[in-house]
Image (cartoon, grey):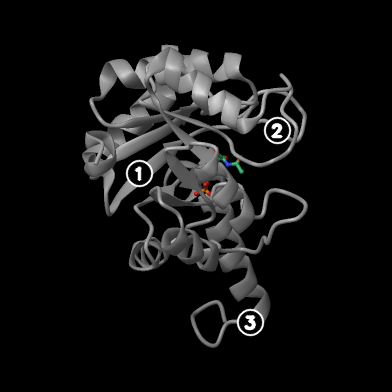
């Protein structure tokens, strides 16, 4: 097995990303977040954007999955070959890209893109998919890893508040390449269950590195309890 894949086998990879306009959308901040999750035991990092990748590459020696979210079309995770080559150039060990069958902005197929990334950079390619059929097709197109990243984020895939662990299990059982469980994994128990159901590794983002979301969960829980009524206490 490729040493990078061996290094993350059965382990946690943490996605360190902030979104446009957010206070933490800053390469230095994301690099500090990456160093913090490394201290906590992350076996790998997933990060977005060329500057974030360069900073994290320089600071940490962990396997680095890189992507570049760009454009306002349906295909926005490393949408073209040019984006993929830039992600590799910024230091990613594994280039993550949209692995769905939807048309790509540069007109290349997934298979052509994967082949070109491999030939021109030697990096591994992770295909982010949303359904079982897309996972099968992505492995057939030559992807080195398949991630469930986009499950619930295409109009035709299954969403919901939690991860699609059935998809993880089916892909892990049937694909000849490692499957990465990613997307809406919010608890340590869900992460463990993804590994138990066959995932090669598990990627957690929001629940570890996105304070606005985590705060919202707690704030809503507190407000919900308040609305439901307190059973006792001084302010009863
Ligand atoms: C759909 C999409 O754009 N997913 C992105 C892919 O890199 C990130 O925004 C997610 O945070 C990442 O996949 C990890 O998932 P979660 O944050 O749910 O643990």
Task: Give left or right: position of 54 versus 136.
Answer: left
**Is residue 7 visible in this depiction of the protein?**
yes
What residue is shown with label 1?
Answer: 13
N-terminal of the two: label 1 or label 3? 1
Relative to 34, is 28 above or below?
A: above
Q: Horizontal and vertical percent for residue 98?
A: 61, 35
Question: Furthest-front residue in view?
Answer: 140
| Picture mark count | 3
Q: Horizontal and vertical percent for residue 174?
A: 46, 61
- Numbered circle sitting on residue 75: 2
Secondary structure beneath dot 1 equals strand
Relative to 85, is 162 above or below?
A: below
Number of residues whose C-alpha sits closer than 10 Å to that of mark 3, classed few (under 14), some (14–19) or many (20 or more): few
Q: Residue at x 55, y 88 (%)?
A: 231
The C terminus, quarter of image: bottom right
Quadrant observed for ligand 1 in the rendered image: top right
Relative to 182, is 109 above or below?
A: above
Q: Nearer the viewer, mark 1 or mark 3?
A: 1
**What is the C-alpha distance between the residues marked 3 and 2?**
45 Å
Q: Residue at x 66, y 29 (%)?
A: 109
Depth check: give the residue in front, 168 or 11.
168
Relative to 12, is 25 above or below?
A: above
N-terminal of the two: label 3 or label 2? 2
What residue is shown with label 3?
Answer: 229
Q: Residue at x 72, y 23 (%)?
A: 71
Depth check: give the residue in front, 92 or 145.
145
Task: Give left or right: position of 205 versus 189.
Answer: right
Number of residues whose C-alpha sits closer than 10 Å to that of mark 1, classed few (under 14), some (14–19) or many (20 or more): many
**What is the C-alpha distance between the residues marked 1 and 2?**
23 Å
N-terminal of the two: label 1 or label 2? 1
The N terminus, quarter of image: top left
- Confirm if mark 3 falls within 8 A of ligand 1: no
């Amino acid at each position: 097995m490729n040493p990078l894949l061996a290094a993350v086998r059965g382990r946690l990879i943490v996605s360190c990303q902030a979104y446009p306009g957010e206070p933490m959308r800053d390469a230095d901040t994301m690099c500090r977040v990456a160093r913090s999750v490394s201290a906590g035991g992350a076996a790998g990092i997933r990060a977005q954007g060329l500057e974030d990748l360069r900073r994290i590459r320089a600071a940490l020696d962990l396997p680095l999955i890189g992507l570049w979210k760009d454009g306002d079309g349906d295909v926005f995770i490393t949408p073209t070959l040019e984006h993929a080559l830039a992600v590799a150039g910024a230091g990613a060990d594994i280039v993550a890209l949209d692995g769905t069958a939807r048309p790509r902005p540069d007109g290349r197929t997934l298979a052509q893109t994967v082949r070109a990334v491999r030939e021109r950079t030697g990096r591994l390619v992770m295909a982010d998919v949303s359904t079982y059929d897309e996972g099968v097709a992505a492995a057939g197109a030559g992807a080195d890893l398949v991630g469930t990243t986009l499950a619930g984020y295409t109009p035709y895939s299954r969403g919901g508040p939690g991860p699609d662990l059935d998809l993880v299990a089916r892909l892990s059982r049937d694909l000849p390449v490692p499957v990465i469980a990613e997307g809406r994994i919010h608890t340590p128990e869900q992460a463990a269950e993804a590994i138990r159901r066959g995932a090669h590794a598990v990627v957690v983002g929001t629940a570890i590195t996105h304070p606005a979301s985590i705060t919202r969960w707690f704030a809503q829980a507190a407000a919900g309890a308040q609305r439901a009524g307190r059973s006792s206490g001084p302010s009863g």
